[in-house]
């Protein structure tokens, strides 16, 4: 189903050809939306497709496109990023234990604490930049470590190769939430991870018009186990959403280039601005973090955060911005700004938010593809006065 041989193409070519070659009847360049639940059997035997919860040709094309990019053994698509992360944890057993990067997306924190604790799966949020701290929390029951690097929203960098070695030495698996970087900028499986996990709602789809999640597996066994589980539980992505994801994927590489180039310019602009205390962006991080990041990634990405000198000014800033829209979510073509303290990370208890540096006045910016001059003017006007 997922061919082992990948064409020796660059990611730009692979993404542009997402979904090409999946219409054996008419040769349509764009994979059709196979809006069907069931499939007529060719005879008394089942055909290649049987029932759309199990497999659907449009979803299959999107899974294959992501899998090729990531060079995985198999990829599964879900109704959202949270559905994907949920499946990873649901395949564990009662009594198992999970470690999660402490400043991971707030929703990941929420399912571990509010949902899985009720089913006997315990968790700890740890500083995954610190291998000693990770080692201290890895116990005999730890089965899974979920890492975000760069993290959300402070863009902190965890060492993926070292984490993979440490986690494997304890017979656990490493999942990397690669939503911010995508395979265009960082390939967790090549760095030793077992799974690359995505909110495909963000950069992979890229247009703020579809929710999706993905798990890319390193081995055939992992893929088969998750595929069986997904077929049994039923949170696989529907055909229309898979098609929207496929269409978005075609431009992923050029979107990342443009968004990253805009983000680098904005990060420098903000770092010199009188109203800004600190900018969080991998390119502007201290030497050790920047070097670590560039040893495992191919660019800095298009997410950045900044701390206002006067925290209360975040309300005026969000009111005044015209092109950059105040909204949660990220990774789309439109630039979006959020105030993580009371938006994306509000699920995290206040003392922990403060401990992590998620404080009032910290803004997270998802930089889009607009003209850089318009973005700079917008920020300059909104930060004035
Ligand atoms: C890094 C990260 N992972 C996972 C998720 C959850 O994805 P979704 O909203 O598609 O469920 C998000 C959502 O913002 C995210 O930012």
Image (cartoon, rainbow, N blue to C red):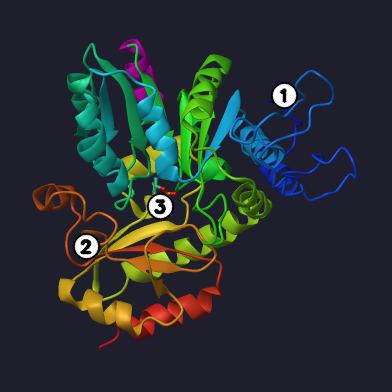
Counting residues from the N terminus, which is met first, the one under dot 2 or under dot 3? 3
Q: Which residue is mark 3?
A: 283
**Disc 1 element:** loop
User: Cβ–Cβ below 8 Å for labels 2 and 3?
Assistant: no
Counting residues from the N terminus, which is met first, the one under dot 2 or under dot 1? 1
Q: CA distance from mark 1 to mark 3?
A: 36 Å
Within-10-Å neighbours for mark 1: few <14, some 14–19, many 20+: few
The verdict on residue 102 being magenta is no
Looking at the rendering, which quadrant does residue 8 occupy?
top right
Is 218 left or right of 385, judged from the image as shown? right
Q: Which residue is mark 2?
A: 342
| Residue at 51% over, 68% down | 334
Within-10-Å neighbours for mark 3: few <14, some 14–19, many 20+: some
Q: Nearer the viewer, residue 228 or 363?
A: 228
Counting residues from the N terminus, which is met first, the one under dot 1 or under dot 3? 1
| Residue at 66% over, 50% down | 243
**Disc 2 element:** helix
Q: Which mark is residue 203?
A: none
Q: Which residue is mark 1?
A: 3
User: Cβ–Cβ below 8 Å for labels 2 and 1?
Assistant: no
Q: CA distance from mark 2 to mark 1?
A: 45 Å
Q: Which circle, 1 or 3, is nearer the viewer?
A: 1
Q: Position of residue 92 (x, y in %)?
A: 34, 21
Vertical placement of residue 109 versus 248, above or below = above
Q: Is mark 1 within 8 Å of ligand 1?
A: no
Identity of the residue furthest to the left in this view: 351
Vertical placement of residue 64 versus 339, above or below = above
Q: Position of residue 24 (x, y in %)?
A: 87, 37
Q: Which residues are magenta?
A: 161-170
């Amino acid at each position: 189903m997922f061919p082992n041989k990948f064409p020796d193409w660059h990611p730009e070519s692979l993404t542009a050809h997402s979904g090409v070659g999946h219409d054996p009847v008419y040769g349509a360049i764009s994979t059709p939306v196979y809006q069907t639940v069931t499939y007529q059997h060719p005879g008394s035997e089942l055909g290649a497709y049987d029932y759309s919860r199990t497999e659907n040709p449009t979803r299959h094309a999107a899974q294959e496109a992501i899998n090729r990019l990531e060079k995985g053994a198999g990829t599964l698509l879900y109704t959202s990023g949270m559905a994907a992360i949920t499946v990873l944890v649901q395949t564990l057993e009662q009594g198992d234990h999970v470690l999660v990067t402490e400043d991971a997306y707030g929703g990941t924190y929420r399912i571990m604490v509010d949902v899985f604790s009720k089913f006997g799966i315990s968790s700890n949020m740890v500083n995954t930049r610190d291998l000693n701290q990770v080692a201290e929390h890895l116990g005999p029951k730890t089965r899974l470590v979920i890492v975000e690097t760069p993290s959300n929203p402070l863009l902190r960098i965890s060492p993926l190769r070292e984490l993979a070695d440490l986690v494997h030495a304890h017979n656990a698996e490493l999942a990397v939430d690669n939503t911010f970087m995508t395979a265009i900028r960082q390939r967790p499986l090549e760095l030793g991870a077992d799974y690359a996990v995505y909110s495909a709602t963000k950069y992979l789809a890229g247009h703020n018009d579809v929710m999706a999640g993905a798990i890319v597996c390193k081995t055939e066994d992992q893929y088969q186990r998750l595929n069986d589980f997904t077929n049994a539980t039923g949170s696989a992505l529907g055909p229309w959403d898979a098609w929207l994801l496929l269409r978005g994927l075609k431009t992923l590489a050029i979107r990342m280039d443009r968004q990253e180039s805009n983000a680098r310019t904005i990060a420098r602009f903000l770092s010199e601005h009188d109203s800004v205390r600190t900018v969080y962006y991998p390119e502007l991080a201290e030497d050790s973090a920047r070097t670590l990041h560039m040893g495992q990634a191919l660019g800095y990405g298009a997410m950045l955060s900044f701390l206002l000198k006067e925290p209360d000014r975040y309300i005026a800033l969000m009111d005044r911005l015209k092109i950059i829209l105040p909204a949660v979510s990220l990774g789309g073509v439109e630039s979006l700004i959020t105030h993580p303290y009371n938006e994306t990370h509000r699920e995290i208890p206040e003392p922990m938010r403060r401990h992590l540096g998620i404080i009032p006045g910290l803004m997270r910016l998802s930089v889009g593809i607009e003209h850089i001059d318009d973005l700079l003017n917008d920020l300059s006007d909104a930060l004035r006065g």
